[in-house]
Amino acid sequence: MKYAILDDHIVPEEEVKIQLMDRGYHFGDGIYEVVRLYNGSFFAMDAHLERLFSSAAKLDMDIPFTQEKLVNLSTELVKKEALHDGAIYMQLTRGATPRNHLYQRGEKPILTGFTLPAKPPVEDQKQGISAYVTDDIRWLRCDIKSINLLGNVMAKREASDHECGEAIMHRDGIVTEGSSSNLFLVNDRTLYTHPANHLILNGITRQQVIELAKKLDLQVVEEPFPKEVLAQADEAFVTSTSIEVTPITTFKGQVEASLSIGTVTRELQEAFASLIPK
């Protein structure tokens, strides 16, 4: 990485400095998006930016840029980095003000962005991963893509400590999602996933998989389900921008089970691959 976005400019990476009074630094008072770049083209950029603006509105935060401006900045950054495949990270915090829990409206937000190397986890997609079932200790507005991710980080660490690639979280026994992904179960060619309410992040890949499933004449049920159901699934997989569609073959922790990678998961992997710019 040699360059970065800072407000409405592309600057050398070393010129981007954290402001001591940035509310993102003190309170996690900010939002972000990660957008994949395949073969030189952004993937689902409009959907990501719509969610960014939605998250900002939910936090009573202004975005002093149009979606067109953010696309132009992202395009310019990718061009300067000569990036063909990877991702771009965009972050917006409420701004730099004297430290106070009470925020003031009308402050100037701080926009930053940078590129990331990114490749699909091909082996995980072929072989599947283990997932660790644990408590969901996050706040109650998981629909906002906030930079305050401490609960997610702790769950991911716990999963890794048990040799699992993802944590699957539940609130009082009701499964929500992964620490950095959305979860789907499959039974009798029907997909089951938690509804897109305040308890999960409505992932862009999640939305695309639901649409693909409908085109494949698969039933999709968006309802809460208890963690015990995990052991009864025919198939399970997780979705996100970085992992696309990745099967789960083992549940560990509070639920223990082994699953096969089934035909529905493979169909959805193929259908998702067809969306990627060649």
Image: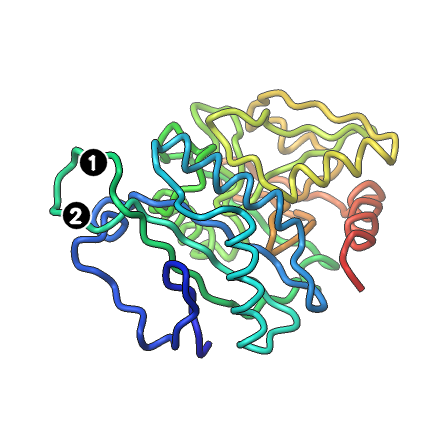
Residue at 60% over, 74% down = 83
Three-letter amino acid code of the residue under disc 2:
Thr
Q: Quadrant of residue 208?
A: top right
**Depth order, front residue of 175/162:** 175
Q: Is residue 225 above or below residue 159?
A: above
**Depth order, front residue of 72/181:** 72
Looking at the rendered image, the quarter that the C terminus falls into is bottom right
- Circle 2 packing at 10 Å, graded few (<14), some (14-19), many (20+), is some
Three-letter amino acid code of the residue under disc 1:
Tyr
- Circle 1 packing at 10 Å, graded few (<14), some (14-19), many (20+), is some
**Dot 2 and dot 1 residues touching (CB under 8 Å):** yes
Disc on the earlier residue, 2 or 1: 2
Q: Is residue 202 above or below residue 86?
A: above
**Residue bearing mark 2:** 97
Expressed as whole percent of the image width and height from the top left, the position of residue 63 reads 40, 43
**Residue bearing mark 1:** 103
Q: Quadrant of residue 203?
A: top right
Expressed as whole percent of the image width and height from the top left, the position of residue 61 reads 35, 37
Expressed as whole percent of the image width and height from the top left, the position of residue 54 reads 48, 34
Residue at 71% over, 43% down = 259
In the image, taking residue 76 as reference, residue 84 lies left or right, namely right
Q: How is the image coloured?
A: rainbow
**Depth order, front residue of 246/34:** 34
For the residue labelled by badge 1, is the local secondary structure a helix, a strand or a loop? Answer: loop
Q: How many marks?
A: 2
In the image, taking residue 233 as reference, residue 35 lies left or right, namely left
Q: Is residue 149 above or below residue 37?
A: above
Residue at 69% over, 30% down = 232
For the residue labelled by badge 2, is the local secondary structure a helix, a strand or a loop? Answer: loop
**CA gap, disc 2 to disc 1?**
8 Å
**Depth order, front residue of 63/170:** 63
